[in-house]
Structure formats: structure tokens, C-alpha cells
Image (tube, helix red, strand yellow):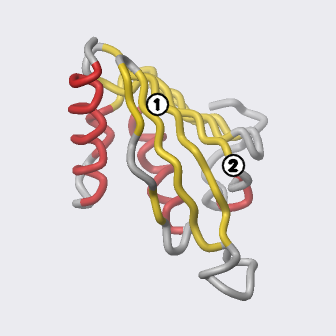
Amino acid sequence: MKATETLAVIDRYFDLMGRGEDFATCYAEDVRWTTFDGGTVVSGPTKVRDYLIGLHRNMPDIHTRPLAYAAETAYVEGDCADPRGASASTDRIAFCIAYDIANGVITAARCYGAIGFLAPAGSVDPAAGA
């Protein structure tokens, strides 16, 4: 898979997400999302999509940096306001998401950063691994 094909997949993914459309169509059937802080693992297109919708609701004032990508991989860095902080402009939480892409779909995503506490309530049992 060429880097331009990777970019097309990620661009479509973020376009659908940004328009509030079903971005689960961008995932492989066995897609796996991992949030390392807190150990949350979610598998399957609809479960990953639903988890991310809930997570984004808990991440106020998200800012992202320009996407970095190559053949079969993409990375996005960003930050959001820390809802526990006094100031949304100075109390921020940084994160990075690494995407694996194959055959025109996202096969895995890994989130790095101290955002585990922002996981949607009751969405996933981290001990269950799925």
C-alpha cells in the first residue's frame, strides 16, 4: 500500500468523523483500539466507533497537529483541555494516535497519552480486553 493510499483512507476517516457520519466503515472487521493509559482495549468496528464518540465527548477543546503518514501507517498528535483544570487554555492533555492501515481500512489504532480517565463511563471493562 502506497503512502498516498494511506492518506486517502485517513482523510476519508476524518472527513466522515467530522461530518458526524458513520466512520466505522473505515475499519477492518477485526479492528482494535488500545488506550495505553488505563489499559482499555476495544475490538470491532461499531464498538470502536461508539467508544470514540463517547471519548470525544469527554475531550473538550480538541486541537490536532498536521497528520504524519507513510505506507500503511499514520500518526496524529493533539491535545485537549483537561476538564479537571482551572483553565482550558493552559491545562491541556497531550496525546498521539498511531494507526495501522492495510487493504484500504484501518486495522488498529493505539492512543498514547494520559487520557484514560476520559473514557466514556461504562463503555468498556479494561480487564475484559474487548
**First in sequence: mark 2 or mark 1?**
1
Question: In which quadrant is the N terminus drawn?
Answer: top left
Q: Residue at x 61, y 82 (%)?
A: 88
Quarter of the rendering containing residue 20: bottom left
Q: Nearer the viewer, residue 31 or 121?
A: 31
Q: Nearer the viewer, residue 87 or 51?
A: 87
In space, the residues marked 2 and 1 are separated at their CA atoms by: 15 Å
Tag 2 residue:
113
Instruction: State whether residue 33 is above or below residue 92.
Output: above
Tag 1 residue:
99
Q: Is residue 82 left or right of residue 47?
A: right
Q: Nearer the viewer, residue 86 or 118?
A: 86
Q: Residue at x 62, y 35 (%)?
A: 34
Q: Nearer the viewer, residue 122 or 33?
A: 33
| Residue at disc 2, secondary structure | loop
Q: Is residue 124 left or right of residue 15?
A: right
Quarter of the rendering containing residue 38: top right
Q: Is residue 112 left or right of residue 101?
A: right
How far across and down, in percent of the image, does residue 60 sit?
54, 73
How far across and down, in percent of the image, does residue 97 sit?
54, 41
How far across and down, in percent of the image, does residue 31 sit?
45, 26
| Residue at disc 1, secondary structure | strand
Q: Identity of the amino acid at label 1?
A: Tyr
Q: Identity of the amino acid at label 2?
A: Gly
Give the number of the disc on residue 55: none
Instruction: State whether residue 23 is above or below residue 41.
Output: below
How far across and down, in percent of the image, does residue 42 sit?
57, 36
Residue at the far bottom: name it. 86
Q: Count numbered badges in the picture.
A: 2
